[in-house]
Image (cartoon, grey):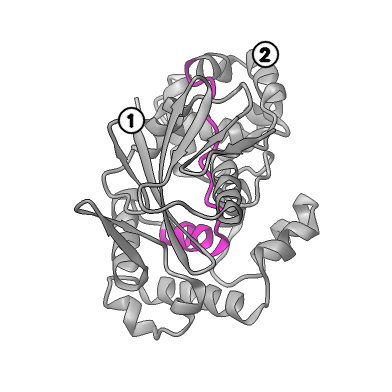
Amino acid sequence: MKWINHGKSMEIFPPKEFDFDECLIFLERSEGEILHQIKDGYLYKLIKINDELILTKIGSESHSIQVEFPIGIPSETTGEIVAEYIWEWFDLGQNLGEFYEMARKDTILDQLANAYYGLRIICIPDLFEALTWAILGQQINLTFAYSLKKRLVEQYGESLTYDGQTYWLFPTHEKIAELEIEDLKRLQFSTRKAEYVIGVAEALTSGQFSKETLLDLKEYHYVHQALLSIRGVGAWTADYVMMKCLHYPDAFPIADVGLHNALKQQLGLERKPTIEEIEKIAVNWKGWEAYTTFYLWRSLYE
């Protein structure tokens, strides 16, 4: 049994390799984040289900995830969808036993796996959000990327205010597909990024592709190629989306600057390693490149 619906609350039972507090540390890494809030050890997240805005208050107790609903009790069906969302958000469907077994035999990962045991990839279940966030992050620093996301969300996303706090949803692709390039440029998007984001929104809205059609392709190569066919999506963006939205544990954003900085730090190098050097090191990580990358990112937040 994955979860129990208690009406006013839900109890989700994650796999044994899960540490809620470790996941919170990663979720708390940026003050610029607008799509969730953390207060007193609880994670607050707004979710929209069938036109209904559901505010969730998520905590942990005795190795179970406790989900409360501060505003109204959702129907049983809605509660199930909330539980499925949280299950996907924390990548709880992934069996990490093999990852930890591999990590124990790897010089770089052994220490990180022990230090961050139970950390799971914090996913982005919505494909449009994942693609947009990846596009925003191209060739700019993370702080500015968060600023752009905040402006986009506050301008075009839905919100709910409870107990003096405002909680936000990422804009829908339908909403962004209606915009002009100039609308996003007013938020300080570059012309190119505005074109890419609106283009992705239009393609999703027209049904050119969807999360379901990508997942139906199954094989890494076909999914990667399908993503690369989208204007504005390069190899890094494709692997990032496969890692954070489509749950491919072997997705490997090898050109990622954060990955390079973390490896430089872990290996005690005076310069960042080259792609060729990373490819040699990564031979040991086969099948778990996404989790290796995520744990290396985590090491940057010490």
Q: Nearer the viewer, residue 160 or 92?
A: 160
Q: Identity of the amino acid at label 1?
A: Gly
The answer to whether mark 2 and mark 1 are in CB contact below 8 A is no
- Judged left or right of residue 217, residue 136 is left
At label 2, the amino acid type is Lys
Q: Residue at x 56, y 25 (%)?
A: 18
Q: Residue at x 74, y 65 (%)?
A: 213
Q: Earlier in the sequence, mark 2 or mark 1?
A: 1
Task: Name which residue lies at 36% across and 56% down.
Answer: 140
Q: Is mark 1 on a helix, strand or loop?
A: loop
Residue on which the image places disc 2: 105
Q: Mark 1 points at which residue?
A: 41
Q: Residue 16 carries which label?
A: none
Q: Which of 141 and 133 is in front in this view?
A: 133
Quarter of the image holding residue 286?
A: top right
Q: Which image quadrant is residue 92 in?
A: top right
Magenta residues, start to end: 115-136
Image vertical order of residue 48 relative to residue 293, above or below: below
Residue 145: in sight, yes or no? yes
Residue 272 shows in the view: no
Q: Is mark 2 on a helix, strand or loop?
A: loop
| Residue 77 x %, y % | 61, 55
